[in-house]
Amino acid sequence: MQMILHLLKKALILLISLWCVVTGTFFLMHAIPGDPFIGDRVIPQEVLDSLYAFYGLDEPLWVQYLNYLKGIFRGELGPSIVYQGRTVNEFIAEGFPVSAQLGLQALLLAIPVGILLGTWAAQKRSQWQDNCAMIISTMGVSVPNFVLSSILQFCFCVKLHLLPVARWGSFDHTILPTLALAALPIAFIARLTRSNMVEVLQQDYIRTASAKGLPLFRISLRHGLRNALLPVITYLGPVATQILTGSFMIEKIFAIPGLGQWMIHSINGRDYPMIMGLTIFFSSFLMISMFAVDLLYSLLDPRIRFSKERMANG
Amino acid sequence: MDKPVGYLEDAWARLRSNRAALFALYSLGFLFFMAIFGPLFSPYSYSEIHLELKNMAPCAKYWFGSDELGRDLFTRVWWGARISLFIGITAATIDVIIGILWGSTAAFCGGKVDEAMMRICDVLYAIPYLLLVILLTVIRGTGIVTILIAMTLTGWINMARIVRGQILQLKQNDYITAARAIGASPLRILFRHLIPNALGPIIAAMTLTIPTAIFTEAFLSFLGLGIQAPAASWGVMVNDGLSAMRYYPWRLFFPAAMITLTMLSFNLLGNALRDALDPRLRR
């Protein structure tokens, strides 16, 4: 019961946040002075009127707002103004799979590598291996991903000619972007895993295991990691954010036709409906993933489960 | 008998014994010094154009080389340092001020006020920070003020949570009850007893906010949403340097190295401060 209430509360907060994003985006975008259609060209008034009518811009602001909300409930994010005849949904359908593939590859690389690095560091605590791993991790947090990707491009493409510099197509094209995108999550996961592992390794059951004579490696893996892994789920929320923001730059640098690239195009072209639609899409995607992570965590953590049962009994 | 060691002395001693923290302190000292005085060492201004001397490699005339308009990279890099350090520190300071006010009010009032204030935080916190920043720069136009507003709009939340947590914990202490018993006003208790004791984690968190702010500025400038030409921001310079990477790598190297060094130093210092100021680790 307690747990359901807790989840309901979280879901409510999620809904309010989503509404804030949609409303804030809508009104901010409409507060921009100027007109989306009047650029360098002179447009006759009749044409402007019909353009306004076509995009629904002749209605009062609150009617436009309600229409936009209705559209979002149906999953329609409206037309693009710069690319005429195309909708934001089409761009998402086109760009999202590319970004998602890149993001997933980075995630699949970052989680195991980060966990291994963190576990290793915790096991060799305060020895040179630990210092080494933590230096790597601090570097990973400190080197901005656009710097890292330039370094990677410089080494592997310009100097060694091993991999393609940019563009999208074969698996080779994905190697460098994936590496560049995964660096920050790896550093982040390694650091957190290390501190969790250090804490877990001080527990009594670890001492028992080592008193039984189990080798340290086995203890770390069998007893330590199992307990240190659970919090990794909670990292997934921030990691999703890191990967998403990272993708903006990585896609720009490597000329990858993903959604981040479209976001940058629409910002530079001042394609307001598109910026609005993509902001809402990205925000909802992130917020819902965070919520899912929360949900997963409360389902998996025995402490939360047990406290729920205790409350139900008591 | 041993001289009693104060909290700050103890923290300082622990900070000094940490080699990474020492490195961070020295390199930050260097960066601050060069940000203030660096441009004075060079005869050029950051926007001075010499088209006949473009894309020069680092040499006696141009210590860090010159860019595609013949501007001196040495001067530009340290101008960039001014912008980055200014933005990082200002944003972190604003975050801390709002965070302390919000967090301590919530913790001190408690009850329904606390609940409401923290729920507002939850709602705002869920909004992705960078998207908000992008949205705001698109709308308000680019510039340092916009960047600062955008960064602090949700940046203070983390600080407010830390302050609230600290104060809730400290409120339980006997000396607070004692202070209340002798009739100290709530505001006095807050500013004399609670906030000074919560400063350790606040300072550590603040130090770790600075690299995030510097990164955000570089990110925005890199995307073309931040500081505009001819001003020299590290993000702009990296973006320019990227296109010339193949033939003039120094144009990428110097700004990129400086961003990295700055972020690394603040991260190292922040981590060390967090350890040094944590009273639980005190011997």
Image (tube, grey):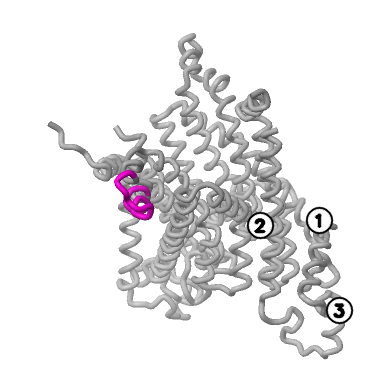
> Would you say the magenta stretch is mainly helix, strand or loop?
helix
Amino acid at dot 3: Ala
Tag 1 secondary structure:
helix
Residue B28 lies left or right of residue A199; in this view the side is left
- Look at the image and give the residue range highlighted in magenta: B181-194
- The answer to whether residue A43 shows anywhere in this view is yes
Which chain contains the residue that carries disc 1?
A: A
Which quadrant: the C terminus of chain B?
A: top left
Q: Which residue is mark 2?
A: A251
What residue is rendered at 86% in x and 70% in y? A85
Q: Chain of mark 2?
A: A
Mark 3 and mark 1: Cα distance apart in space: 27 Å
Q: Are marks 3 and 1 in contact (CB under 8 Å)?
A: no
Q: For residue A103: magenta? A: no
Which numbered disc flags the more N-terminal residue, 2 or 1?
A: 1
The local secondary structure at tag 3 comes to: helix
Marks 3, 1 in one chain = yes
Which residue is at 47% across, 31% downward? A121
- On the rendered structure, is B10 left or right of A103? left
Q: CA distance from mark 2 to mark 1?
A: 17 Å
Q: Amino acid at mark 2?
A: Glu
User: Where's residue A132, x and y in %?
Assistant: 43, 36
Q: Secondary structure at mark 2?
A: helix
- Taking the view exactly as shown, the residue that stands out farthest to the left is B1
> For mark 3, does the 10 Å Cα neighbourhood hold few (<14), some (14 to 19), or many (20 or more) residues?
few
